[in-house]
Amino acid sequence: MTGDAMPPTRSFGLLLALLSALTFSTSGPFARALLDAGWTAPAAVATRIGVAAVVLAVPAALLLRGRWGVIRRDLTGVVLFGVLGVAAAQVGFFNAIRYLPVGVALLLEYLGVVLVVFWMWAVHGQRPRALTAAGAITAIVGLVLVLDLRGGAGGLSLVGVAWGLFAGVGLASYFVLGARESGSDDDVPALALATAGMAIGAVVLVLLGVTGLLPMHATFGQVSLGGRELSWLVPVVGLSLVAAVVAYVAGILAARALGARLSSFVGLTEVLFAVLVAWLVLDELPAPVQIAGGVLIVAGVALVRLDERKPALVSA
């Protein structure tokens, strides 16, 4: 399946999108353990995607054996995916939270889902219909409730807002570029795209760190995770294998099965999963308003899914 010889069905694509959102959501507790131990955010992100790229390098190389031309033919798309879909999204978000509350930064980043809708309309002529518009509004309202922005959004920093919107562009790029597929043997396999994208993203972040544009610092002692003292390797492995390897490969496969628009809306469930993971791992109990927001996100995704099914029902 990672070779994309048999693309997943749309129903299985939904499961892959949910798996991607769930695994992406685990990055919060793992990253917090490293940040609390003295790591800078860019160092944690570069390590996360760099280790993941190394883990996937051998299977990706085996998959591309005799097919390296597909990378050369789509080199621009692969580089853009790594720079925008991986590095820019991460750098934008972690810079945004230097100036803004985390909830506000997340909301700005996930406005990238709206950018996906406009991109598909402007470039591919996929004008959003009533159900998609209703689903978008419902999901965004749910996102605001899940993030529970009360008491932390006053006096927004324009610099922080700019970084948050930049992260939104990166997130939109992740879905749009990850969904690109012609259905021919010339497509870059999902596993290879994930590997190359993370490798390029890691190199970009390291270069930014070396030049002093991003702070790079890491410690190598004990960290606190879920109330337990563990080796620093535990969150690094979690970030790399769960929140990167599984998350990116599943996300790209889902985007190719569902398309950029629907997969981006399903990706909103990452915020809901993040709240649940924080509850289970960090004992941060979700508030009733967050639970209500989660219901609205699911309802919004369901509306977009119904809209995606309408052409098939009409043609039948």
Image (cartoon, grey):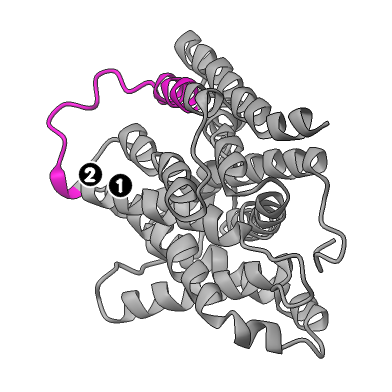
Label 1 environment density (alpha carbons within 10 Å; few <14, some 14–19, many ≥20): many
Q: CA distance from mark 1 to mark 2?
A: 5 Å
Vertical side of 99 occupied by 273: above or below: above
Percent across and percent down for residue 48 are: 55, 63
Percent across and percent down for residue 59 are: 79, 76
Q: Is residue 165 left or right of residue 106?
A: left
Q: Are marks 1 and 2 in contact (CB under 8 Å)?
A: yes
Does the magenta segment cover residue 231?
no
Residue depicted at x 25% and y 76%: 212
Q: Which residue is tagged 1? A: 164
Vertical side of 172 occupied by 138: above or below: above
Does the magenta segment cover residue 138?
yes
Residue depicted at x 46% and y 22%: 146
Q: Is residue 83 left or right of residue 179?
A: left
Percent across and percent down for residue 286 are: 51, 18
The amino acid beneath tag 2 is Val
**Residue at the far front in the pictured view:** 315
Residue depicted at x 77% and y 86%: 67
Q: Quadrant of the N terminus?
A: bottom right
User: What range is drawn magenta here?
Assistant: 136-159
Element under label 1?
helix
Q: Quadrant of the C terminus?
A: top right
Percent across and percent down for residue 196 are: 60, 75
The amino acid beneath tag 1 is Gly
Most foreground residue, 168 or 95? 168
Residue depicted at x 53% and y 42%: 29
Q: Which residue is tagged 2? A: 161
